[in-house]
């Protein structure tokens, strides 16, 4: 099994486009399809032909180019069974824990309801890759449009259970705003402070903050750190449940 090649680029204003390419077979998948033109340009630049779209959830900024790309390439669209009727051009719906194969690379479906009710993440265990879309961001998590804090907390725990050295690609370049918020919740976390300073520099230079890793997020992302004693003390929630601490952090970010 040859290593997958990845290409990361921006779509719309702050959506990440990601292409994954298996050099042995020539198969190429787009993780979501936020906008046709940048995806076409990335394919052209790399000399790749699109064969698949892996859809994480039904929001318009993730499925906008499904039908156009399917018409152009005949790409197969795989997406969440919980949102099957809302995904344009869907060919195959997949459920939690279901496994399928992309060019000989095993893919495991992780349902992570909360941002939307049927949101899924794609985990490539042998490649140590996770495509988390709008469930987990660098130093952030998705807004709770279709789920309770308890539901989202359970979803994030599913991602936290993955190996620390899993590389994580996510749906939006929101990291600068996330970093500025994170230090208000977890002000004494030295690794977070250093990371936040680095992110200010990266964004100032126009660089991307993706990808991240599960381990780095567990150490610095306040949305994964509801059990941390320093954060609980800072919020005055020493005796609350982890889900309640998570809910408070999400509420503060919504008003940040
Ligand atoms: Fe979304």
Image: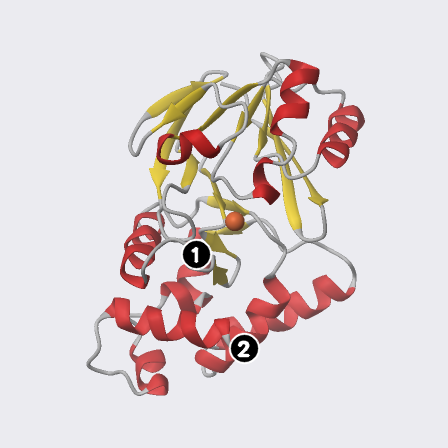
| CB contact under 8 Å: marks 2 and 1 | no
Q: Position of residue 49 (x, y in %)?
A: 69, 17
Horizontal placement of 110 versus 20: left or right? left
Q: Is mark 1 within 8 Å of ligand 1?
A: yes
Q: Name the spot of residue 238 as percent of width and height, x first.
A: 24, 83
Quadrant in the picture for the C terminus = bottom right
- Which residue is the site of mark 1? 145
Q: In terms of secondary structure, where does tag 1 sit?
A: loop
Of callouts 2 and 1, the N-terminal one: 1
- Position of 173 compared to 133: left or right? right
Circle 2 residues within 10 Å: few <14, some 14–19, many ≥20: few
Residue, x 21% and y 72% (percent of image)?
Answer: 241
Q: Position of residue 5 (x, y in %)?
A: 62, 29
> In terms of depth relative to the viewer, which is nearer, 50 or 204?
50
Residue drawn 46% across the image and 67% down it: 220
In the displayed structure, 156 sits above or below 189; it is above
Query: Does residue 114 lie above or below 80 as drawn?
Result: below
Q: Which marked residue is nearer to the observer: mark 2 or mark 1?
A: 1
Residue drawn 76% across and 66% down? 204
* Side of 171 where 127 appears, left or right: left
Instruction: Pick whichever, 26 or 245, lies toward us.
Output: 245
Disc 1 crowd, CA 10 A, few/some/many (<14, 14-19, 20+): few
Residue 185 visible here: yes
Is 179 located above or below residue 229 in the figure?
Answer: above
Residue designated by label 2: 256
State the image coordinates of residue 208 (x, y, percent, origin top left): 68, 53
């Amino acid at each position: 099994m040859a290593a997958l090649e990845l290409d990361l680029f921006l779509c719309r204003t702050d959506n990440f486009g990601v292409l994954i390419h298996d050099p042995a077979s020539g198969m190429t998948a787009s993780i979501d399809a936020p906008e046709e033109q940048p995806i076409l340009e990335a394919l052209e630049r790399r000399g790749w032909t699109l064969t698949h779209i892996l859809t994480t959830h039904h929001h318009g900024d993730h499925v906008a180019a499904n039908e156009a790309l399917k018409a152009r390439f005949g790409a197969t669209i795989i997406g969440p069974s919980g949102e099957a009727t809302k995904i344009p051009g869907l060919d195959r719906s997949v459920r939690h824990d279901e496994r399928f194969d992309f060019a000989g690379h095993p893919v495991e479906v992780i349902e992570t309801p909360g941002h939307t009710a049927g949101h899924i993440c794609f985990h490539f265990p042998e490649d140590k890759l996770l495509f988390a879309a709008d469930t987990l961001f660098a130093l952030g998590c998705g807004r709770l449009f279709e789920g309770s804090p308890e539901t989202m907390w359970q979803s994030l725990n599913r991602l936290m259970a993955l190996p620390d050295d899993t590389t994580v690609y996510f749906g939006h370049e929101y990291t600068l705003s996330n970093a500025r918020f994170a230090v208000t919740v977890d002000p004494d976390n030295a690794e977070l402070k250093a990371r936040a300073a680095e992110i200010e520099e990266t964004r100032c230079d126009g660089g991307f903050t993706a990808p991240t890793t599960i381990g780095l997020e567990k150490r610095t992302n306040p949305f994964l750190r509801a059990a941390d004693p320093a954060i609980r003390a800072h919020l005055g929630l020493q005796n609350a449940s982890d889900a309640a601490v998570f809910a408070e952090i999400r509420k503060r970010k919504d008003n940040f």
